[in-house]
Amino acid sequence: MTMLLASAPENGITVIFNTFGVTLPYFVASCINFFVVIWVLKRFAFGPIQSMLEERRARIADGEAKLKQIEAQLAEPEANTAAAIAKAAADAQHMIDEAREGAAVLSEQKAQEAIAQAHQILAKAEVAAKADRERLTVELKREFGRLVAATTAQVSGKVLTTEDQSRINEETLTRVEA
């Protein structure tokens, strides 16, 4: 039959072993069996599972690192695009400002040119008016002299010579101009 730990002095462990019917050879065999099963599980079950889990963790970490890298790469073109848009907007505003300034300068130049042309036209008109005035004055003097000579010839009843007509014209013109 089974040998109980009755030969040892009775202490707490002996009482527990006797109460539960634990025998030393079966207990040692059970402990050896337990450690063999643990070693087999660790070697052939838990080890591969642990290595597979480590590989998965490594792949997940790599995937997260690549995801962060891709997000950074995606953010970079967006930032570049935003910077390019901002630069293009600034350039466009600069061009608009330059165009406005150029238009103002050109408008001022055209206004100055128009004023200069207007002054030239006025000067030409004054010269033309003065020339017309002088021409009309000369014609008027000539006509006036002819009329005075004709009137004098009719009043005196005699035919005036060219010399008489010139003298009368000069006297009349001198009086009219004074």
Image: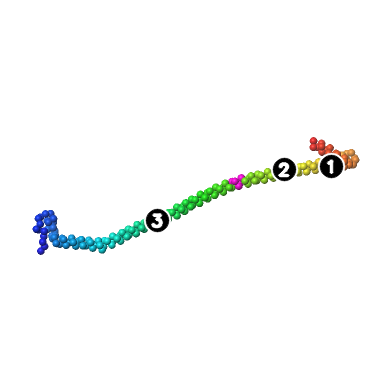
| Magenta residues, dominant SS class | helix
Question: What residue does disc 3 label?
Answer: 69
Kind of residue at disc 2: Glu
**Is residue 169 shown in magenta?**
no
Q: Position of residue 84 (x, y in %)?
A: 48, 52
Between disc 3 and disc 2, whose residue precedes? 3
Q: Position of residue 32 (x, y in %)?
A: 18, 61
Kind of residue at disc 3: Gln
Q: Residues within 10 Å of mark 3 (few under 14, many from 20)?
A: few
Q: Residue at x 79, y 37 (%)?
A: 177
Kind of residue at disc 1: Arg
Left or right: where does residue 117 sit relative to residue 86?
right
Q: Nearer the viewer, mark 2 or mark 1?
A: 2
Q: Nearer the viewer, mark 1 or mark 3?
A: 3
Between disc 2 and disc 1, whose residue precedes? 2
Q: CA distance from mark 1 to mark 3?
A: 112 Å
Question: What residue does disc 2 label?
Answer: 126
Q: Residue at x 10, y 57 (%)?
A: 8
Left or right: where does residue 90 sit relative to residue 70?
right
Left or right: where does residue 20 sit relative to residue 157?
left
Disc 3 + disc 2, Cβ < 8 Å: no
Q: Which residues are magenta?
A: 104-108
Q: Position of residue 114 (x, y in %)?
A: 65, 46
Q: CA distance from mark 3 to mark 2?
A: 83 Å
Q: Quadrant of residue 34?
A: bottom left
Q: Quadrant of residue 144?
A: top right
Q: Residues within 10 Å of mark 1 (few under 14, many from 20)?
A: some
Which residue is more in the foreground, 63 or 167? 63
Q: CA distance from mark 2 to mark 1?
A: 29 Å
Left or right: where does residue 128 sit relative to residue 29?
right
Question: What residue does disc 1 label?
Answer: 146
Q: Position of residue 52 (x, y in %)?
A: 30, 61
